[in-house]
Amino acid sequence: MPKFELSRRRFLTASAVGAASLPLSGCFDSAGEIGGSVRNTLELANSLTYRVQRLLLRSDHLAVEYAESEIRQPQRPNGTVTPTDADYLSLAEASFSDYRLEISGLVERPMQLSLDELRNMPSRTQVTRHDCVEGWSCIAKWTGTPLGPVLDQAGIRPNARYVVFDCFDTMEAGFTGPVRYYESIDLVDAHHPQTILAYGLNGETLPVANGAPLRVRVERQLGYKMAKYIRAIRLTDTLAGIGGGRGGYWEDYGYDWFAGI
Ligand SMILES: Nc1nc2c(c(=O)[nH]1)N[C@H]1C(S)=C(S)[C@@H](COP(=O)(O)O)O[C@H]1N2
Ligand SMILES: [Mo]
C-alpha cells in the first residue's frame, strides 16, 4: 500500500470524532475495487479548486446508476443512527405524521411541506453507490422527489446561492460544543436531476438509521454531504453564518465543502 494511503487512513481515523464504529456489514471497504477510486477522489478534491471541478463535472453529468441485482448489502448506517433529540423523538413516535419540512431564507414563498405532500410530488427512484470518506461504499435504491423543483415552487430569489440543510440530530463533539448536523450544497447540485429528497430506501420507507423521515441524496459527492434527518432547508447567499462558516459539520473539521466523486 503506498504511503499516502496509510497516512490518510490514520488521519481519517484520528479525525472521525463521533463517527459510529459499526462493522462493515457487507459493504465493500477500501481494500476493494471502489476504495481506490474514493481515495483518488480525495486526492483530486484536495488539489483542485471547486471551480475546476465544476468545469470537469458538467452540470448535467449523471452519476452511475446500477441494476437492482447489483445491490449486495443493506445501506450501512453511519454517523448518527438513532437521534435522541426530543423534538425528533416525538415526531417519530407519531410515525412523522406531524413532520413538516420548512423551506425558508431567500425564497419568495416560505413553505412547510408534509410527507404526504412530498410523496405526491414527482418521484424518482435510482440505484446508486454511496461512497463514505472513511473508505467504504454501498449500492442502494433511493426513492424521493427531486429537490430543484421543490425549491422552485418556493420561488428562489436571484441572490440565493446555497441550499443549507438543518438536521434534527445533535452531534456531541461539535466544533464549539454540541450542535445539530448541518450541510450545504450549491444551486447547481440542488437542480441536478439525481439530487432528491429521499423518503424511501430499497423499496421500504426510509428507516431511522438512514435518516427518516427525509434525507438528501447528492449522488456526485461523498456521503457526508447527504444530510439525514432534515428538519429545514434554508436558501442563503453566503455560508458565513452557518456553523463555523465552512458550510457543513465535517467541513468545519477540515473536510472539503465540494466533495466531488
Ligand atoms: N444528519 C446527519 N446526516 C448525515 C450524517 C450524520 O451523522 N447526521 N452522517 C453523514 C455520513 S458521514 C454518511 S457516510 C452518510 C451515511 O448515510 P447512511 O447512514 O444512510 O449510510 O450520512 C451523512 N449524513
Ligand atoms: Mo461518511
Image: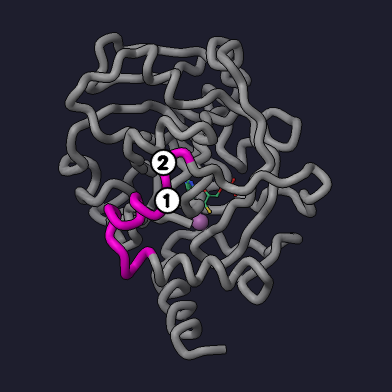
| Labelled disc at residue 57 | 1
Looking at the image, which residue is at 51% across and 52% down? Answer: 223
Q: Secondary structure at mark 2?
A: loop
Nearer the observer, 45 or 198: 45
Crowding at label 2, few (<14), some or many (≥20) Cα neighbours within 10 Å? few
Above-or-below relation of 258 to 198: below
**Which image quadrant is residue 239 in?**
top left
Q: Circle 2 sits on which residue? A: 59
Amino acid type of the residue tagged 1 in the rendering: Leu
Question: In screen coordinates, is 151 left or right of 195?
Answer: left
Looking at the image, which residue is at 41% across and 41% down? Answer: 59
Q: Which residues are magenta?
A: 45-60
Asked whether 47 falls inside the magenta stretch, the response is yes
| Labelled disc at residue 194 | none
Q: Residue 185: x, y in percent?
A: 35, 40
Asked whether 62 falls inside the magenta stretch, the response is no
Q: Is residue 191 visible?
A: yes
Q: Residue 247: x, y in percent?
A: 28, 46
Please, what is the dominant secondary structure of the magenta stretch? helix
Amino acid type of the residue tagged 2 in the rendering: Ser
The answer to whether mark 1 and mark 2 are in CB contact below 8 A is: yes
Quadrant (top left/top right/bottom left/bottom right) for the N terminus: bottom right
Above-or-below relation of 5 to 51: below
The verdict on label 1 being within 8 Å of ligand 2 is: no
Nearer the observer, 42 or 79: 42
Q: Secondary structure at mark 1?
A: loop
Above-or-below relation of 55 to 213: below
Q: Residue 125: x, y in percent?
A: 66, 30
Looking at the image, which residue is at 54% across and 43% down? Answer: 62
